[in-house]
Amino acid sequence: MVHDGSFQVVEARVAPSADRATKEVPASAPGPERMASLDAFRGFIMFWIIGGEGLMAGPQALGHNRIIDAIVYELNHTPWQGLRFYDCIWPSFMLMVGLSIPFSFSKRSLTQTCCQQLGHALRRTVVLFLLGSVRESVSLRSPYLVELSSALQPIAIAYLVAFLMARKSWKFQASVGALILAGYAFLLAFVPAAGIPAGTYALNHNLVHYVDIALLGQKHWDIWPYAPEGWGTVLSTIPTISTTILGLRMGELLMSGRPKGPRQGSLGESDFCAWRSATF
């Protein structure tokens, strides 16, 4: 310690042992970076889910023109046959669910074991499923476990299936996804029901509707406000799983160390497959 006028200079020496201890402290491993495109995709989908179509419905109320009318037309579900932009929001959301799994899996792998990650996935699945039950029960003012044409419950089931496949090879994932779609198409095309010939796709007169009535009850269907639109529940969850698996594969491609060019080509092919499955 040295005195210099009004100033006091203090010299501190660090013990060698403390210095060594400081050097031996390992730096924390950096977590995986967020992907801006995935966040943008998530925000784009959620914008339409929470009612983004209202931005165009307002101008249409002030006056009609071809451009606004065409946009509003695409921002409503097709009554039954056909495909509009708004019909692609749901498969796009499930694609996003699958896309997110590899990133979440990679991040949690830094701090959790496989059993801990599985426990987290199971808890999330149960919570989402029960939230669907609560929403249906509150909406219909009667207790129901399964929500008709649910969003939360298919998300829960498809998320869990995709999570369980996250450690499988891409060939296994592709095979399961293709078999699921093929099996779904086979059911609709070749399996009849009471009073419903095989290959019938009429509104509320098809195998999907028959299975829902048989398993969930006619009373439940009769009080459901969206019954005239013919949305399915039980069998309709099958292609939802396939779409989520496709998203899982796309997420793994984005995280891979492949060159940019091949990844873009593979994702382009995956986008085309997703569009085709949505149109089906």
Image (spheres, helix red, strand yellow):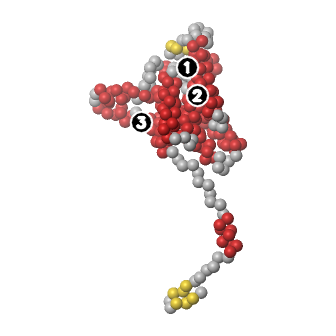
Local packing at callout 1 (Cα closer than 10 Å; few below 14, some 14-19, many 20+) is few
Horizontal and vertical percent for residue 256?
57, 41
> Which residue corresponds to the image point at 60% horizontal and 16% vertical from the top-left?
187
Q: Which residue is mark 2?
A: 242
Task: Please name the residue that numbered disc 3 is placed on.
Answer: 52
Q: Residue furthest right?
A: 115
- Amino acid identity at mark 1: Asp
Q: Nearer the viewer, mark 1 or mark 2?
A: 2
Crowd rating for badge 3 (residues with CA inside 10 Å; few <14, some 14–19, many 20+): some
Mark number, residue 222: 1
Q: Nearer the viewer, residue 141 or 206?
A: 206
Mark 2 neighbour class, 10 Å CA radius: few under 14, some 14 to 19, many 20 or more: many
Q: Is residue 215 above or below residue 68?
A: above
Q: Quadrant of residue 85?
A: top left
User: Looking at the image, is mark 1 or mark 3 nearer the viewer?
Assistant: 3
Say what amino acid the circle numbered 2 marks: Ser
Q: CA distance from mark 3 to mark 2?
A: 27 Å
Q: Position of residue 136 (x, y in %)?
A: 57, 30
In front: mark 3 or mark 2? 2
> Which residue does the image show at 52% across and 24% down from the upper left?
277
Q: Measuring from the top left, give residue 203's x and y in whole percent.
A: 50, 15
Q: Amino acid at mark 3?
A: Gly
Q: Is residue 225 visible?
A: no
